[in-house]
Image: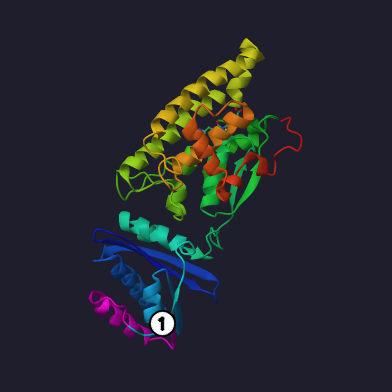
Amino acid sequence: MVDASWKEGDAGLAVVLVEPSAGSSKWMAKRCKAASPMEAEMLAICWALQLGKDLGHDSITVLTDAQILAKSLQARRCPPVWKVRPLALNILNLCSAFSSCNFFYISRSDNSIGYSIAKKARIDGHVTSLLFREGSPGATATGDDQPKLKLYSYWRSSCSFRVRIALNLKGLDYDYEAVNLVKGEQRNPEFLKLNPIGYVPVLVDGDIVLSDSFAILLVSCSTAAAVCCVPYLDEKYPQHPLLPTDLKRKAINLQVANIVSASIQPLQNLVLLSYIKEKFGPEEITPWVKYHLGNGFAALEGLLKNYAGRYATGDEVFLADLFLAPQIHSFVTRFNFDLSQYPILSRLNEAYSLLPAFQNAMPEKQPDYPSSSTS
Ligand SMILES: N[C@@H](CCC(=O)N[C@@H](CS)C(=O)NCC(=O)O)C(=O)O
């Protein structure tokens, strides 16, 4: 599978080499110059053919989302754009190295991994080594030879909910390890070894233990560019990037995420509410939560006025949405507050409810969701 991302002369090329007999795939990406999107796509095709040839393959099938290109090359014709004729001849020449060489069209949505990798390569020239993987090419793969991800989670935890959405968006399979916060399992010595502060979520990825949703979603800083903070999951699993490339939108995503995770969620955390209940009485909980969540929601509503599209910062799902959906869900279902005074947040909530990655991350869908809602 090949794809290319192009903007103003810069291109990112991606090749996902699938070897069905070995049941494995290799993902590669690089940045280069190209005069047009079509030229970029053709450079990606050339690269794939060259790789196939170097690896000694006898037959090859190239899947591209450039429909006209696939059709022309399959018919061994040059595409109807004279500027790319030399490249087309190069491709057709490379074809003759194989006993069978086919070109087929693949839809953009079926080629989403290739697109994400190519886009990342265009923006971040250092991605080549990061993106070399082996394993199944499917969007769900973490790699055949890698241990499955394990997520320590609690059904109602909004911080775990954020990570569940991200894993679903990236199509990453994981084992769900329930930690019952109401029973105090987060303070078991075994769990404290994973996260000394006794909070979920914790994500175990091979020998890496990430015990904070921020660590999982945000803090791995790329050495490639000082300005670019690449989320851990994006760096390791580039499909469906969590941050936009546009600097302003990226900043807004980080701002929303930080408002939710630093200035709203901690004020509703179980450990704090238990403390308030014990020190000041149970009747103090609702006014406390209402006051602080109200402040936070008003700020978010104002902030998003200038950015929201179908989702928080435009028409694509990004980090801000991963933090907003769980926070809104707990506002409505855990505390039974009225969301209608926040029209943008209400609309976003509706939009999230239609997305499978969000639906499947919902508290009600988790294996530890209690059959009676007493927990
Ligand atoms: N900054 C942490 C906060 C984690 C957190 O507060 N987790 C809550 C659930 S959303 C928790 O485990 N609370 C346990 C308790 O209050 O005892 C993160 O983003 O992961």
Please tell me which residue lies in front, 131 or 119. Answer: 119
Residue flagged by tag 1: what amino acid is it?
A: Gln
Q: Quadrant of ligand 1?
A: top right
Q: Is residue 307 magenta?
A: no
Secondary structure under tag 1 reads helix
User: Disc 1 marks which residue?
Assistant: 74
The correct choice, above or below, for 160 with respect to 91 in the image is above
Q: Is residue 83 magenta?
A: yes
Determine if residue 125 is in view.
no
- The C terminus, quarter of image: top right
Disc 1 C-beta below 8 A from ligand 1? no
Name which residue lies at 68% across and 29% down.
Answer: 182
Name which residue lies at 62% across and 40% down.
Answer: 153
Whole-percent x, y for residue 34 in the image: 25, 66
Quick one: which residue is furthest to the top in this view? 280
Determine if residue 126 is in view.
yes
Q: How is the image coloured?
A: rainbow
Quick one: which residue is furthest to the right in this view? 372
Name which residue lies at 30% across and 65% down.
Answer: 37
Please tell me which residue lies in front, 29 or 80. Answer: 80
Span highlighted in magenta in the image? 78-102
Name which residue lies at 58% across and 34% down.
Answer: 329
The correct choice, above or below, for 268 with respect to 140 in the image is above
114 with respect to 279 (left or right) = left
- The N terminus, quarter of image: bottom left
**Crowdedness of circle 1 by 10 Å Cα count: few (<14), some, many (20+)?**
some
Whole-percent x, y for residue 149 in the image: 57, 51
The correct choice, above or below, for 39 with respect to 276 in the image is below
Whole-percent x, y for residue 222 in the image: 36, 48
Residue 164 sits in quarter: top right
Image mark count:
1
